[in-house]
Image: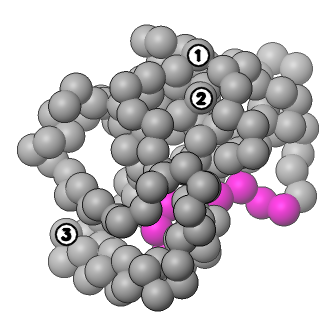
Amino acid sequence: GVSKWGKDTDLNSSSIGIELDNNGIGDVWQDAQINSLMKLLATLKKKYVIPQSNFIGHSDIAPGRKNDPRNFPWKKLAENGFGYWYDEVLQPAPADFDSEKALRYIGYNTANLPAAIEAFKLHFIQIDISKTLTPFDISVLYNLYLKY
């Protein structure tokens, strides 16, 4: 389907989609399932030389069109080299920090900014997936922006 990450607009030809069995709303992601996923990701990362920043979710590449996976253990994956996560101690963003530019820099398609914010929050905030950024969300975004 229609998707974008950074400048790549043909993700169907340049990505590997992995589907996991979970209703995506309230089910807990099982440790055995996530551990198997990480073994697969390690193999794929090595074989295809995939950068850590390119381990992303369905909603990340199709904001507004896809809203999964939900409640996914992205932090655990990032701790194992598959994607990024924010630090425990966050620096506040500078007063002139441009959240939209930061989302775009990370890779989000900001053509529909509220949808991009929601996708960002599905991945990184998880407990509040509204389409507006709180001061905490902005600090998380700033921290991630510095990593990319």
Q: For the point 89% across and 58% down, which residue is it?
A: 89
Q: Along the horizontal axis of the image, is 137 left or right of 59?
A: right
Q: Give, as a single range, the part of the protein colored magenta.
A: 81-88
Residue 115 in picture, x, y percent from top left: 52, 21
Main SS, magenta region, reads loop
What whole-number distance in Å separates the C-alpha atoms at marks 3 and 2?
30 Å
Do tag 3 and tag 1 residues touch (Cβ < 8 Å)? no
Do tag 2 and tag 1 residues touch (Cβ < 8 Å)? yes
Q: For the point 45% across and 45% down, which residue is it?
A: 68
Viewer-proximal residue among 48 and 16: 16
Helix, strand or loop under label 3: helix
Q: For the point 43% across and 62% down, which residue is it?
A: 22
Helix, strand or loop under label 2: helix
Q: How is the image coloured?
A: one colour
For disc 1, the marked residue is 114
For disc 2, the marked residue is 118
Would you say residue 24 is visible in this rendering? yes
Which quadrant is the N terminus positioned in? top left
Callout 3 crowding tier (Cα within 10 Å): few <14, some 14–19, many ≥20: few
Q: Would you say residue 85 sits in the magenta stretch?
A: yes
Q: Earlier in the sequence, mark 3 or mark 2?
A: 3
Would you say residue 103 is visible in this rendering? no
Residue 28 in picture, x, y percent from top left: 59, 68
Residue 12 in picture, x, y percent from top left: 14, 42
What amino acid is at disc 3? Tyr
Q: For the point 77% across and 60% down, which residue is it?
A: 87
What amino acid is at disc 1? Pro
Q: Would you say residue 66 sits in the magenta stretch?
A: no
Callout 2 crowding tier (Cα within 10 Å): few <14, some 14–19, many ≥20: many
What whole-number distance in Å separates the C-alpha atoms at marks 2 and 1?
6 Å
For disc 3, the marked residue is 48
Do tag 3 and tag 2 residues touch (Cβ < 8 Å)? no
